Image: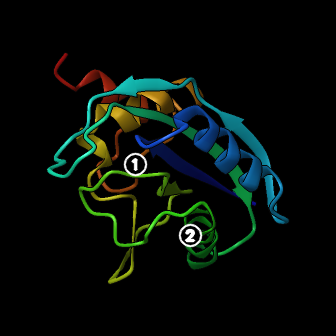
Amino acid sequence: MNPVLIALGTNIGDRAGHIRRAISALRATPGIASLTTAPWFETDPVGMTDAPINPFINTAVTVETSQEPAAVLALLQGIETTMGQAIDKNNTARIIDLDIIGYGSRVINHPHLTIPHPRFRTRRFVLEPLVFIAPDWVDPVSGQSIRALFESLSP
């Protein structure tokens, strides 16, 4: 089994309901085990230019899985699509956003999948929930733990 860190965010409609529904879908997935949920945080949007620019609810989960990273990505995109989120979602409002932040100690640089997530190290809205559930996970690129990355952010 491989530990996987997943970030969740939403800023449209029933935000709390969207987070609960996505977590329920993950829990119900065969091959996903040991799901741990972080606290939820309301955060301002980062880099968004379209309306509605509502606050996000962000959280994170850790899971254990034997699925390969591409299969986990397909699972997350399937949950997003089922919930009504378009896959092309760069800097847009989101019904739900599910991102693989880390997959054990693997480093993947593929046109459709980059692990660890390329921008997570500077994003408080990702690191803050993760520090509660995976503070000692070490980013295989920087060699720093989630806790160290979070503590290095400006307040």
In the rendered view, tell whether residue 97 sits above or below residue 148. below
Residue under the image location 40 percent in, 55 percent down? 140
Q: Which mark is residue 90?
A: none
User: 84 or 43, which is in the foreground?
Assistant: 84
Q: Is residue 36 left or right of residue 111?
A: right
Q: Earlier in the sequence, mark 1 or mark 2?
A: 2
User: 85 or 79, which is in the foreground?
Assistant: 85
Q: Quadrant of residue 147?
A: top left
Question: Residue tagged by mark 1?
Answer: 139
**Residue 114, percent across and down?**
37, 70
Question: Tag 1's secondary structure?
Answer: loop
**Residue 92, percent across and down?**
27, 56
In the rendered view, tell whether residue 135 sits above or below residue 18. above
Residue under the image location 40 percent in, 52 percent down? 94
**Residue 51, percent across and down?**
23, 47
Question: Residue tagged by mark 2?
Answer: 81
Q: Quadrant of residue 148?
A: top left
Amino acid type, residue under disc 2 in the picture: Thr
**Tag 1–tag 2 contact (CB < 8 Å):** no
Amino acid type, residue under disc 1 in the picture: Asp
